[in-house]
Image (cartoon, grey):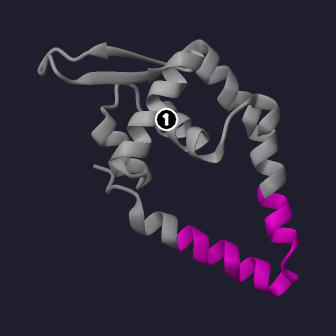
Amino acid sequence: MADLDVTSTQYTILVACGERDGLSQQDIINMTGIDRSTVSQVVQLLLRKGLLKRRRTRHDARAYAISLTEAGRKTLNQSAPIIERVEEALIEALPATRAKTFVSNLRTIVAAFEPAKP
C-alpha cells in the first residue's frame, strides 16, 4: 500500500467510509475497533490528503458526517488488487488443508461481528 501512500489503519477507515456514507467518528470507531484518538488523527490526515470530506450534520451542529471523496474512492479501487495479493499470500503460506479451515474460521468470525440485517 506504500505506492498509494496509505497505511493499514488509513485503509481500514477508508473501507468503513466506503461501506456507509456520512459516518460519524463514533460510527468509524464502532465499525473498526480503532481507538478514538487514532481515528481522530487518521481522519484529520485523510481529510488533508483529500481522501475524505466532512460536513456538519443536521441533527447535531457539533457532529460531522464523514464521506469518501472521489480520490478516496479511487484509492480504494486501486488498493483492491493489492489486498487480494496480500490475502492470497497469507493463505498460500498455509498447507492446503489448513488454509480451508483458516478461511472458514475467518468467515465465521466476520459473520459473528456483522450487524443483523433487517
Is 105 part of what is drawn in magenta? yes
Q: Which residue is mark 1?
A: 42
Which picture quadrant has residue 44? top left
Q: What residue is rendered at 80% in x and 69% in y?
A: 91
Residue at 43% from the left image edge and 22% from the top image edge: 67
Residue 85 in the image, given as x and y percentages of width and height: 84, 51
Say whether residue 50 is left or right of residue 29.
Answer: right
Q: Is residue 46 above or below residue 14?
A: above
Task: Give the image location of residue 72, x and y in percent.
Answer: 60, 22
Q: Is residue 74 left or right of residue 82?
A: left
Is residue 7 shown above or below 93? Answer: above
* Side of 92 where 74 appears, left or right: left
Number of marks: 1
- Check disc 1: other Cα within 10 Å, few if <14, some if 14-19, many if 20+: some
The one of 34 and 31 positioned closer to us in this rendering: 34
Write the start and end of the magenta stretch as one range.
87-108
| Amino acid type at image mark 1 | Val
Horizontal and vertical percent for residue 11?
Answer: 61, 40
Q: Identify the residue at image location x=21%, y=24%.
A: 63
Q: What secondary structure is marked by label 1?
A: helix
Q: Main secondary structure of the magenta part?
A: helix
Q: Please provide percent x and percent y for residue 38.
A: 43, 44
Please say whether residue 113 is one of the residues in the magenta stretch: no
Look at the image and tell me in which quarter the N terminus lies: top right
Q: Is residue 86 placed above or below 102 in the rendered structure?
A: above
112 to 53, vertically: above or below: below
User: Residue, x 86% and y 81% (percent of image)?
Assistant: 96
The image quarter containing residue 49 is top right
